[in-house]
Amino acid sequence: MKGAHTVKVAFVGKGGSGKTTLTSLFAAYLSGSGHPVLAIDADINQHLAVALGASAEEAAALPTLGEHLPLIKDWLRGDNPRITSAEAMIKTTPPGRGSRLVRPFEDNPVFAACFRDVAGVRLGVTGQFTEDDLGVACYHSKVGAAELLLNHLVDDAGEYVVMDMTAGADAFASGLFTRFDVTFLVCEPTLRSVGVYRQYAEYARDFGVRLAVVGNKVTDDEDVEFLREQLGSDLLCWLSGSSHVRAAERGRARPITALEPHNLDALATIQSTVDATPRDWAKFHRQAVEFHLRNARSWGNERAGQDLAEQVDPEFVPGPPALAGA
């Protein structure tokens, strides 16, 4: 189903580039315009809730996707006969006939357990490292729940799903980077930040990931010229220094309408780019299956004690028709 309105976006970039800030500004901009927004914090630092306006105490009290992984698996499995048990599901298990496809703003046990309203945004967080994780787990074990959820998430016109990703090229350690219609790379006017862009762009190109660059922390025309020289046509827009952002970082949140006009224009450009990008559900599902088979061969089959390629339903494509039972 090509041509459907597209709404899944991710923000990536070098650590410290401001991707969490951009994620929160864009989510607030959409919400302030009356659009429903579902946001997921998949960054190891887990600062999105505070950036949206929650207090540190409120952010710390949020439930996490990682701690509810058994519930997520059991709910999404539904009565799919190809999945022998919820325990047999791995982070890349794709949906098939009998699986539960979910809408981003419906009421179900997963959203009730894992998501909370923060400043008008439906927010889920993957969870921070715990002492038990240190030295024995990678952060991608935390974001697996988000990847599984996105594989089963069917969004439609006027619904926005926004994710704050892990820093740098770490996002390529799982198939999560293919779950978005547009990936916005936040780039400072520095050679280090441009280096992360080039690495990400090379990887993204191999998988047909649409990448657009948003400049950040721009202070003058020289910064703009540098970004244009280094990024070429990939540079979509840029944001300059913001007293609005500094106030939020000091715990004094302001309405998004108080953001500087140029920065508001940049957010509008980001939204128009998302809205103009067609969704190809067949490609979306094909990539999910590709990464599932890779993970199955690499480690999943051994862990599950079975051939997880059998979980793939060759006649199934997700999307609104599948959700409606068409």
Image (spheres, grey):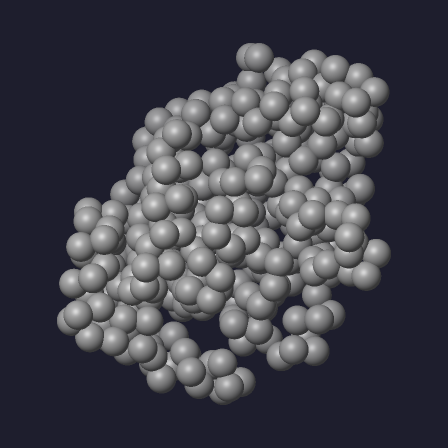
Q: How many marks?
A: 0
80 on left or right of 239:
right
Q: Quadrant of residue 194?
A: bottom left
Residue visible at 75% across and 48% down in the picture: 137
Of residues 140 and 154, the one nearer the viewer is 140
Q: Position of residue 7 (x, y in %)?
A: 41, 45
In the image, residue 317 sits, relative to residue 124, either above or below, namely above
Q: Nearer the viewer, residue 10 or 217?
A: 217
Q: Position of residue 14 (x, y in %)?
A: 45, 58
> For the point 73% across and 70% down, which residue is it?
61
Rendering quarter of residue 95: top right
Instruction: List x then y, in percent, for residue 84.
Output: 80, 21
Q: Using the image, determine if residue 275 lies above or below residue 44.
A: above
Closest to the observer, 17 or 9: 17
Say if residue 325 shows up in the picture. Answer: no
Q: Residue at x 44, y 62 (%)?
A: 19
Expressed as whole percent of the image width and height from the top left, the position of residue 295 reads 65, 27
Q: Quadrant of the N terminus?
A: top left
Q: Which residue appears at 69% of the width and 58% of the height?
A: 127
- Residue farthest to the front? 191
Direction from residue 33 to residue 125 in the image, left or right: right
The reply, left or right, for residue 311 in relation to residue 238 is: right
Depth check: 23 or 203 in front? 203
Residue 125 visible, this angle = yes
